[in-house]
Image (cartoon, rainbow, N blue to C red):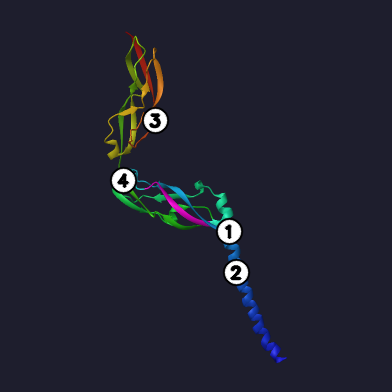
C-alpha cells in the first residue's frame, strides 16, 4: 500500500510533464503550420519633409522586404497593404543616409519581417525653389503649298514650376512636345503636353493649348 502512494505522485508528475510537452508541441505545430516566406518590392515614401527643402535625388526608389506569414494571410494581402514610410524631418542640405528599419514598415498583423534589403537610402537634399518660365511651342513640318505659318500662340504662355534649386536653375524655358503641321491648310488649335526634357519639377499644368494661324501666300 505504501509503495502505491509513493509511486502515484511520481507517475502523476511524469504524466503532467508529458502533457505540457505535448501541448507545447501542438502549439508550435498549429502556429507554424503553413508558414511561408516571400519577398515584396515596396516603393519608399517620405513624410515630414522640411518646408524649405526638396529631395533632389535618391539612391533607390524601392526596397525588398522579406516576410513570413501563414499562407492564408499572404494570399489575402496586396502590395498596397505594406508601406515603407521614412521620417525625414531631420535631414540636412546635401547628402543624407537614412536607415530603413522594421519600425519604418507598415504591415498587417500576422506578418513577420525577416530582413530588409537594402537597409539604407541616400538622399540628396536641396533648397526648394519656385519660378515662372515661358512655354515654347515646338512646331515641325510645313503647311500645304500656298500657305505660310503666320503665328503660333500658347495658352498659358508661362508656367509656374517648383522643385529643387539645382534643377530649376537650369530651366529657362519649357518646350512642348512636337506639333506636326505637315500639309495643313487651315488654322488649328491643339492641346499638347509639355516636355520636361529630363528635368524634375512640379507644375499645376502638364498640357497647354497652342493656336496655329496660317496665311495664304
Q: Which residue is mark 4?
A: 125
Q: Name which residue lies at 58% across and 66% down.
A: 28
Label 3 packing within 10 angstroms: few (<14), some (14-19), many (20+): few
Of pointers 2 and 3, the one earlier in the residue sequence: 2
Q: Earlier in the sequence, mark 2 or mark 4?
A: 2
Spatial distance from mark 2 to mark 4, Cα to Cα?
53 Å
Give the secondary structure at mark 1.
loop
Q: Secondary structure at mark 4?
A: strand
Q: Which residue is mark 1?
A: 34
Residue 150 lies in the magenta-colored region:
no
Q: Residues within 10 Å of mark 4 (few under 14, many from 20)?
A: many
In the rendered structure, which disc, 4 or 1, sits on the residue that comes first in sequence? 1
Q: Is residue 202 above or below residue 177?
A: below
Nearer the camera: disc 2 or disc 4 = 2
Whole-angstrom CA distance, mark 1 to mark 3, is: 49 Å
Q: Magenta span has 62?
A: yes
Residue 79 in the image: x percent, y percent? 50, 47
Say which element carries label 2: helix
Amino acid at each position: 500500500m505504501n509503495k502505491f502512494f509513493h509511486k502515484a505522485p511520481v507517475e502523476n508528475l511524469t504524466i503532467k510533464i508529458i502533457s505540457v510537452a505535448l501541448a507545447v508541441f501542438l502549439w508550435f505545430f498549429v502556429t507554424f503550420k503553413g508558414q511561408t516566406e516571400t519577398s515584396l518590392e515596396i516603393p519608399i515614401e517620405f513624410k515630414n519633409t522640411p518646408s524649405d527643402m526638396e529631395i533632389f535625388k535618391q539612391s533607390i526608389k524601392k526596397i525588398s522586404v522579406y516576410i513570413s506569414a501563414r499562407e492564408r494571410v499572404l494570399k489575402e494581402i496586396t502590395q498596397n497593404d505594406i508601406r515603407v514610410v521614412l521620417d525625414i524631418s531631420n535631414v540636412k542640405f546635401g547628402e543624407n543616409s537614412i536607415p530603413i528599419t522594421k519600425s519604418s514598415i507598415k504591415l498587417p498583423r500576422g506578418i513577420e519581417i525577416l530582413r530588409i534589403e537594402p537597409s539604407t537610402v541616400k538622399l540628396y537634399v536641396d533648397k526648394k525653389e519656385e519660378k515662372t518660365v515661358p512655354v515654347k511651342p515646338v512646331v515641325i513640318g510645313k503647311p500645304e503649298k500656298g500657305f505660310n505659318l503666320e503665328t503660333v500662340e500658347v495658352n498659358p504662355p508661362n508656367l509656374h514650376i517648383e522643385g529643387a534649386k539645382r534643377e530649376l536653375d537650369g530651366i529657362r524655358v519649357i518646350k512642348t512636345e512636337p506639333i506636326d503641321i505637315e500639309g495643313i491648310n487651315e488654322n488649328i488649335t491643339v492641346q499638347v503636353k509639355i516636355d520636361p526634357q529630363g528635368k524634375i519639377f512640379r507644375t499645376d499644368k502638364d498640357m497647354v493649348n497652342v493656336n496655329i494661324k496660317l496665311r495664304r501666300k
